[in-house]
Image (spheres, helix red, strand yellow):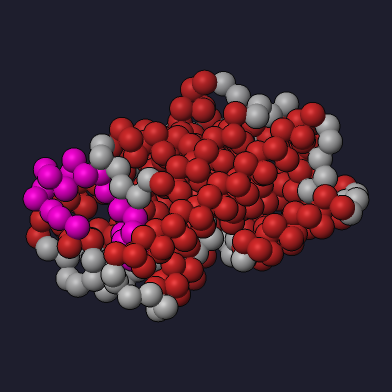
């Protein structure tokens, strides 16, 4: 969505009243139009909970839309009008800074809307729906704020020096989603939160390792720089072409410690009640399957992006459902 459209959309939402039914319909439409796997996953969830899932997803999606506009494409288009002399390079840098400033401004506006939601005065349809969810389950504001902060981090941080820094980013970008999901099902104890964090961080890291090539084209590298040094890699190893031996060794290391996180969080589903455990198990199994696909491709994510085909997704769904019906444990298999 174009930023101009986003800002215009926000003005319309502020001027027009949104009833709860209309807001619920908006969030449902947003979720179903962006999240291709939701229809399958939602079969596991109690129907009465879907409106809350839609509200949470719409919030997360909207934050990402505000923070993930295609800045590189905008800058790339501008490059066609500039030569590479110093004066024009400076002008390009200013334009890029302006684009980043616009994003940060939109994120600030979204944070203000979030706080208005907690104060009881929502106007945007996402927050009209979300306010009911927040009130019904007594959800704290911190996870919502962390998601906004993660998108602020995205504006200026394109490389991570250490694994600890990368984990801190995941604690803002991924872990809050798991905490909120558990929260609407009444799970708030510390142990479950930590298991959820391990799983969500593993899912986020899996996505990073899946998209190394794509991210590099957008000037982003999530593999910690300390690991480049350890395995003798350079920036060139993240670009197009056959991966080097050093790169494969480095990504084998990343894959191994990501699997350790899946292993740490693997008992989460068994500690949950009802069908919600199915949804959690399915997410974990899907992430592990992608990670194993990366390994089978010998860490070459450049020639072919590692994904799960429709048949594989259906198999995961049926296996998870059958295990639940037969009373088997839902802990992911693979190398867990």
Q: Is residue 328 visible in this depiction of the protein?
A: no
Residue 150 against residue 90 in the figure, above or below: above
**The furthest residue to the bottom:** 80
Span shown in magenta? 211-235
Residue 275 against residue 42 in the figure, above or below: above
Which image quarter holds the N terminus? bottom right
Residue 141 located left or right of residue 311: right
Picture coordinates of residue 5, whole percent (x, y)? 69, 64
Q: Is residue 214 magenta?
A: yes
Seen at 12% across and 63% down, the residue is 244
Seen at 60% across and 24% down, the residue is 188
Picture coordinates of residue 315, whole percent (x, y)? 48, 63
Q: Is residue 264 magenta?
A: no
Picture coordinates of residue 308, whole percent (x, y)? 42, 65
Seen at 40% across and 78% down, the residue is 80
Instruction: Decide which of 119, 48 is in the foreground and name it.
Output: 119
């Amino acid at each position: 969505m174009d930023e101009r459209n986003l800002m215009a959309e926000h003005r319309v939402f502020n001027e027009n009243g949104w009833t709860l039914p209309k807001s619920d319909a908006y969030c449902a439409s947003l979720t179903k139009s962006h999240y291709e796997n939701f229809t399958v996953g939602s079969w596991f969830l109690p129907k009465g909970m879907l409106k809350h899932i839609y509200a949470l997803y719409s919030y997360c999606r909207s934050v990402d839309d505000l923070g993930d506009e295609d800045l590189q494409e905008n800058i790339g288009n501008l490059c066609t009008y500039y030569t590479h002399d110093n004066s024009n390079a400076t002008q390009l840098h200013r334009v890029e800074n302006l684009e980043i400033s616009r994003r940060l401004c939109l994120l600030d506006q979204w944070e203000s809307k979030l706080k208005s939601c907690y104060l009881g005065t929502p106007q945007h349809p996402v927050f009209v729906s979300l306010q009911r969810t927040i009130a019904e389950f007594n959800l704290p504001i911190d996870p919502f704020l962390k998601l906004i902060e993660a998108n602020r981090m995205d504006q200026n941080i394109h490389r991570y020096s250490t694994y600890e820094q990368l984990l801190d980013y995941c604690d803002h970008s991924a872990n809050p989603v798991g905490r909120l999901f558990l929260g609407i099902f009444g799970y708030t104890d510390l142990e479950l939160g930590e298991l959820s964090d391990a799983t969500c961080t593993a899912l986020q890291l899996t996505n990073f390792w899946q998209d190394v090539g794509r991210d590099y084209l957008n000037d982003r590298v999530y593999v910690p720089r300390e690991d480049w040094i350890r395995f003798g890699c350079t920036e060139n190893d993240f670009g197009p072409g056959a991966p080097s031996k050093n790169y494969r060794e480095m990504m084998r290391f990343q894959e191994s410690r990501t699997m350790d996180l899946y292993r740490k969080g693997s008992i989460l589903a068994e500690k949950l009640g009802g069908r919600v455990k199915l949804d959690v198990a399915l997410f974990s199994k899907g992430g592990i399957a992608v990670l194993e696909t990366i390994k089978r491709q010998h860490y070459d994510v450049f020639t072919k992006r590692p994904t799960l085909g429709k048949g594989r997704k259906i198999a995961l769904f049926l296996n998870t459902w059958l295990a639940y019906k037969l009373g088997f444990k839902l802990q992911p298999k693979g190398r867990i």
